[in-house]
Amino acid sequence: MIEKWLKTVRTKAAGPGAAAARMWARSPGLWTAGAAILGVGLLWVRAHPPGAGHRREIAAAYGAANTFYGAPQLNHAGSQFTYVATTDARGCALYLCDPHTQLTRQIAFQEDGLGAWRDDYEMRAGPWAPDDRCFVCCVSNRLMVGSADPSQDPAVIDPKPFSEAVWLTSAEFAYVSEGTNLCLAQKGEAGAWEHKLFLSRKDPLVSLTTAGSNAVAWLEHGEVIWRADLSAGPATETVAAATNQVAPPTAGLRLWLDASRLRQPDRAVVMGLPDLSDRRNDAVLNGTPPVFNGTNSLGALAGQGTVHFAWLGSATNGTGLKTRASLGITGAAPRSMFVVMRHTADRPMMVSLGDTSAHGALFAVEWSERLFLPTGWWADNYIDLASTNWNVLEVVYDGVSQKGYVNGVRRGVASATLNTVERGVEIGFRDATGGNDAKAAEGDFAELLIYDRALDAVEREQVEDYLGAKWFGQKTVAPQSLAAGSDPGIEGMTGLVYAPATGELLISRTDNGRDSVWRLDPAAGPNAGATQVAEGAALRGAQWAGPGRFAYVTGGAGRSQIVVADGRGAELSRRATGGTIRSLSVAPAGDRMLFVGSVSNEPADGIWQCNLKTGALQNLVACSGRPCPDAMAVPVVRGYVRPNWPQLTCVLYAPPKVERGRQYPLVISDTVVVDAIHGPMFQSAMAGTGAYVAITERIYWPTGIEQWATNVINLYENLIRDPTVDRRRVYLFAASAETKYMSELVEKTPGPWRGVILLNPTQLPDFSKAPRDQPRPKILIVAGGQEAEEPRFQKYQRDALPAGVLVEYVIGAGETHRYVGKTAKRERAEAVERFIFEE
């Protein structure tokens, strides 16, 4: 039932609405219990039903809501800040604003975005220079430096965008381009800016921060902190440092088998592979010998020989190699395995240690239609990977849990106790010694390294660099040349912030759904370790807030709080916003925080400033260009729809103002609720004016779209008997390709629907064959003017009238398939409000 479904949300609401929520809970209904809360706003009760004027004002407020891109950036003096938002007309702009006077100046404008519908804008406000004279920004997908001087236009630095940027001096900053390139921009004596590539990495550089007067640090994989001294040399040194001569670490290396060391003719039998470690534990024939793929054969890799293993008819036959002795890594001892191999379609390829006779006795990599990694049983932990390409496969076991990697990317984690009984390392054919699971394999093998310890992230990357360079031609920066990495032993790192005064690092972490903040002093030595200073279920945005203090945000939707703590994590202050905080940044001085979000019950995000010393909040940029005191946040909940539970979920947007005994219109759809075709505020605008909006949810746009009508009917039958639903006012809406399925539905069953809303329709309903005894729904069509569909809609309007169908259409001037401009969105919201409430 709707009331019971919303009970959890409304009873948590503050203010006079709590009493109304208790009254709602007494009514029977049809919804299943256990709905998850997505968002919550304050519940207020109006003494009289809202009139048309009120609803129109509410719709206008939702339609004219600002859409912000990224975090606002406050300068060092606190006198100006920059932000990016959509404009009234179709487009996006970079703005410069004075927080004291709130006067705003447009710095740059981008009319057309990226993508097929030109609605994806690559604009970004970046950090300010230390002297506050200029700032980094991204406009039209280009890195620029903007000026606080209104007479100067932004200067293009790089024709590519940036993802991270930090200033070193007032004339020099570092930035990340294309995700993996660390670049340096410098202002020459003549005032012209130049940029150069400093180094390239094979993995994304995340959370770039300063790390000293002329150094930067960043995260890779969420496990390694890298540091680069930018005074080490010019970009030309990157070429010299890029090399294929990278060696793996040798400490704890128990087995190293390399097929490229063989010197044999193509298709010659392979009787053994020499062990290159100091153990000299060679792999020798196990069953039938495999054959060599010569350097010029199709089975070679990067011009180097490999070994081919064959199935030979059954799981008990096959070719194989096996080490002369065990490695001595028994029981639950830590270990790491790296193997370069591929499998033949529909056949497995294996590297095995131990046997299959007991739980946890086997440590192996088996790869067929899935990649199986060892854990309690041989196949408990697997990755969906059916590729028959060559890959670097890795397993690292630390005595407690195993982590599986494919080409350096972690793909699986499993916790289990191993108790390995070793009988040598087997490649290809696995015999039945000690168990009853003999198994043949078919595929190709290049190289194997096994260590008797769990390699840390830096060491693991060193092995990956070695194998990637050797077998896949990947060039990497040699260790200790331009960058150095360290593993602090904190997995799941998401953020890194440097404190210039102390040299300490503030690290954000997310692990198994829990967020935490850690403090690390690199100068304390490699064994000092990091100290946890905060923990929570929804903790984010940790940043230094002055000497010895840091600030962060905690709490979910509708419950966000700003916390300031000392260096040990002891709270100094906590400020509840009553709303939701999203993108945020702390002023360089550490005394103020800017955030994009809501305070209390605004219907959309605005830009706010929080004084971290006093806790005072100030609205700097309104959430909407048409403010309305009656426009409030819409409660949003998610639940299951029977009888299709658990496959069918529904998102329900409810009116924020309710009255006991009243009934409300119901709008139903089956769509991706955050898709940009209708925009995330489209559903909220309908609910905000007094309608229930219920949507069965598809995760991806094309997935399950053919079930549109079935899902909508199912939802309709679940909701229509609810006492708060006005069954005489049930509407449908669909967007783009969905309109085909909605049209087919209303053609067959026009009677239940008071009206249908079609956004950018690909198909329009044809009622010529509809049942004559059922009334026709009225129709509202909304489309962008750039799609040039108005003649089609005019003809449809004329043709539908004789059949008793009233058609209205709204064209968004300058818009394409997806609406961007606030003016068009406002006009659409107002038209939908009139359509639903028939005003």
Image (cartoon, grey):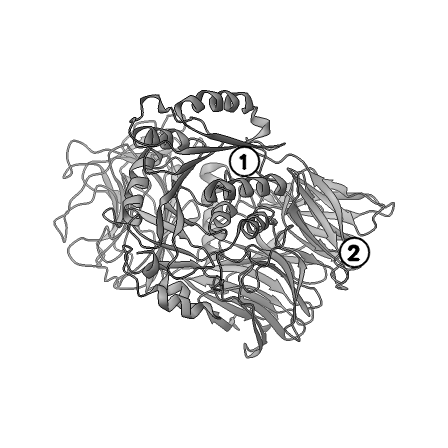
Q: Residue at x 48, y 40 (%)?
A: 835
Q: Residue at x 66, y 75 (%)?
A: 613
Q: Residue 145: x and y, percent? A: 75, 47
Q: Nearer the viewer, residue 235 or 28?
A: 28
The answer to whether residue 794 is above or below residue 74 is: above
Q: Residue 8: x and y, percent? A: 37, 65
Badge 2 density bin: few <14, some 14–19, many ≥20, Cα 10 Å: some
User: Which of label 1 and label 2 is nearer to you?
Assistant: 1
Q: Amino acid at mark 1?
A: Arg
Q: Which corner quadrant holds the N terminus? A: bottom left
Q: Nearer the viewer, residue 207 or 603?
A: 603
Q: Residue 763: x and y, percent? A: 42, 26
Q: Residue 725: x and y, percent? A: 35, 51
The answer to whether residue 62 is above or below residue 566 is: above
The image quarter containing residue 180 is top right
Q: Amino acid at mark 2?
A: Ser
Residue at the spot of label 1: 818
Tag shown at residue 407: none
Residue at the spot of label 2: 170
Of pointers 1 and 2, the one earlier in the residue sequence: 2
